[in-house]
Image (cartoon, rainbow, N blue to C red):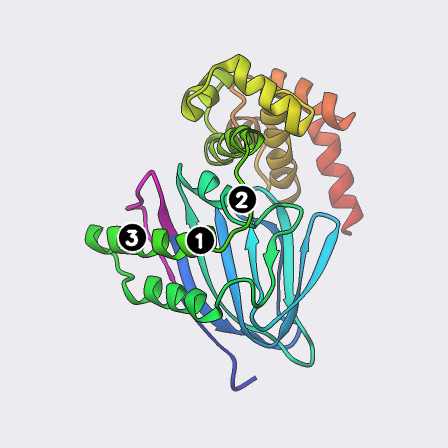
Amino acid sequence: MADTYKYSYKVGEDLLNSLSVYNVGHQKCEPEYQWGPGVRDHYCIHHILSGKGYYTAGSHTFRLEEGDTFIIFPGEEVKYFADKDEPWEYAWAGFMGTDAASIIHSTEFTKETPYIRKGRIPGDRIRDGLEHIYEVKGNTFEATVSMAGALYSFLAVFIHYSEREVQEKDVQMTYVEKAETYIGTNYSYPITVEDVAAYVGISRSHLFRSFQTYLRKSPKEYLSEYRIKQACHLLKETNLSVSAIAYSVGFENNLYFSKAFKKQKQISPSEYRKRKRSQTT
């Protein structure tokens, strides 16, 4: 369509550890334009400027329209697509960093309800915040800091209008989300549960209790499952050898990788690849 457009800017490697803009932009979509199903490795907030669309996270699909705002959580499989009659136009900002999980946890965004409806927050404050991030974009360190400052101010708007009270259990959940972010960024390295706990800033036993409470599994189980999930993607989408895939997802021992894979999937990596590829032919 002639009136569709996309303006976006992706930041390079010069990121701040605490909070950094990963990408920012705005887009007028074609009817039924779709992203996903896929997984982001960062948070991403979209604000709908006009039109309608649909956002699927997990097993739930949400119908969203002008004035609504939705968030993508890192590591969550999602897809979103424009309405066929009134395709949406939206602006977005993707971001990451050690402060991200705790900031988002202080807003009304949750994985169960990853959107905020029109009217809860003045739309002009959301739009202005996203525009300011885009305006100060650039590839210098100064621009990186300016974008981070604009991002902090933008996210503060969501905290200001939040009616949630941060309870102790929310703090515990922040530990889990911070650990998930670290694992999502570093799973390809031979990290251990001790490394994850050190990054979060709590003891291994405290991290274990938090994971058991919120995910009903241990950090070790989560890390292994995450690596196997990434391995499944590589087995389906690439021609890398099983050994190369093992190293790519953080297993230094190919035999241990095959054993862990079979424990979760009940078949070997090679058999998994063969079965998935036969399903697409």
Q: Is residue 250 magenta?
A: no
The residue located at (20%, 53%) in the rendering is: 142
Calculate the distance from the C-alpha at mark 3 to the C-alpha at mark 2: 21 Å
Calculate the distance from the C-alpha at mark 1 to the C-alpha at mark 2: 23 Å
Front tag of 3 and 2: 3
Q: Could you tell me residue 108's position as x and y percent? A: 56, 50
Q: Main secondary structure of the magenta part?
A: loop
Residue type highlighted by circle 1: His
User: Mark 2 and mark 1 in contact (Cβ < 8 Å)?
Assistant: no
In the image: residue 149, left or right of residue 210: left
Residue type highlighted by circle 3: Gly
Q: Residues within 10 Å of mark 2 (few under 14, many from 20)?
A: many
Write down the residue under mark 1: 160
Please give the range of residues in magenta.
9-21
The residue located at (66%, 42%) in the rendering is: 236
Instruction: In the rendered structure, find residue 147 and report the number of the disc placed on it.
Output: none
Write down the residue under mark 2: 74
Front tag of 1 and 2: 1
Front tag of 3 and 1: 1
